[in-house]
Amino acid sequence: ALAGSAAALLLLALFMWLGVRPLAVLSRQLADRDAGSLAPLTLRLAPREVAELRDAINQLFVRVDGVLARERRFAGDVAHELRTPLTTLKLALSEAEPDLPLLRDEVARMARVVEQLLVLARLEQGHWQQRFRSLALAGVCLSAVDDWQVRARQAGMLVRAGPPLAEVALPGDATLLRVLLDNLIGNALKHCPAGTVVTVALHAATARDGAMLTVSDDGPGIPAALRERMTARFERLDRKSEGLGLGLAICRQIADVHGATLVVEAGADGRGLSVSLRFPAA
């Protein structure tokens, strides 16, 4: 009986050690890594409960890495976008008689950049969907077209609403979609010559496709190789000007939070440029 009890205790101790050992290995891996290491933990032949703990920690590492990546990207955005206007202001102020119109333009440019960066930061925090309500897109489109009429006429261009705008209602945020329209219309006015017509169109969903919001122009267009890179951050098609900067990157983020896709393609008959926000089918 004593021998049997001793053997049972030894077996119990062995099983407990085998059960606790994966936790000790996991703890040692965590203790040995530095603060910046977010590589997944590796633990083989672990009990189911310990394996679930390992997987939960690895998922946490992925989320933390995503947050840190967004923070680094935002810091890079700020540094990149503010460097040029700050350099221009510094050079202008070093002159004996500063160019006041130039200073005003650069200050206004910095204000626009800061506003865009703030929108981008809020987009990447991922809290916008909580504010989504059923939204009539036609009203947002008409408001944007009306507000851009004066600036378009000053540039010798025309901004118009396309064929009768479809009555489309879907969950979304009017502020974000207005930012998207302002960026797309503003880019068209900035990069197209006088005489260009910019059209804002809204198409209803069909049996196969979801609703689609499109801003197109009949300007000179952009080569296919450049269209593929247009939604990347800081991709600038004109090195002599302010370029696209964050505008289309923000449009892509706005599309993402609405579950939509941003598509850049040639306009009708191969003329101009067409940027579409394609919402998913119901």
Image (cartoon, rainbow, N blue to C red):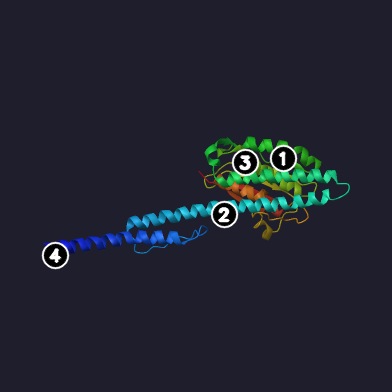
Please state which of the two labelled residues, at mark 2 or mark 1, is closer to the viewer: 2
Amino acid type of the residue that numbered disc 4 sits on in the rendered structure: Ala
Q: Which residue is mark 2?
A: 69
Question: At 17% across and 63% down in the image, what residue appears?
Answer: 6
Give the mark, 4 or 2, whose residue is nearer the N terminus: 4
Q: Nearer the viewer, residue 233 or 115?
A: 115
What is the distance, in whole Å, between disc 4 and disc 2 at their CAs?
60 Å
Give the mark, 3 or 4, whose residue is nearer the N terminus: 4
Give the mark, 4 or 1, whose residue is nearer the N terminus: 4
What is the distance, in whole Å, between disc 2 and disc 1 at their CAs?
40 Å
Where in the figure is residue 54, as x and y percent of width and height? Answer: 40, 57
What is the distance, in whole Å, between disc 2 and disc 3 at their CAs?
25 Å
Say what secondary structure mark 4 lies in.
helix
Please state which of the two labelled residues, at mark 4 or mark 2, is closer to the viewer: 4
Where in the figure is residue 256, as x and y percent of width and height? Answer: 56, 48
Mark drawn on residue 160: 1
Q: Which residue is mark 3?
A: 177
Give the mark, 2 or 1, whose residue is nearer the N terminus: 2
Left or right of residue 125: residue 237: right
Q: Which residue is mark 4?
A: 3
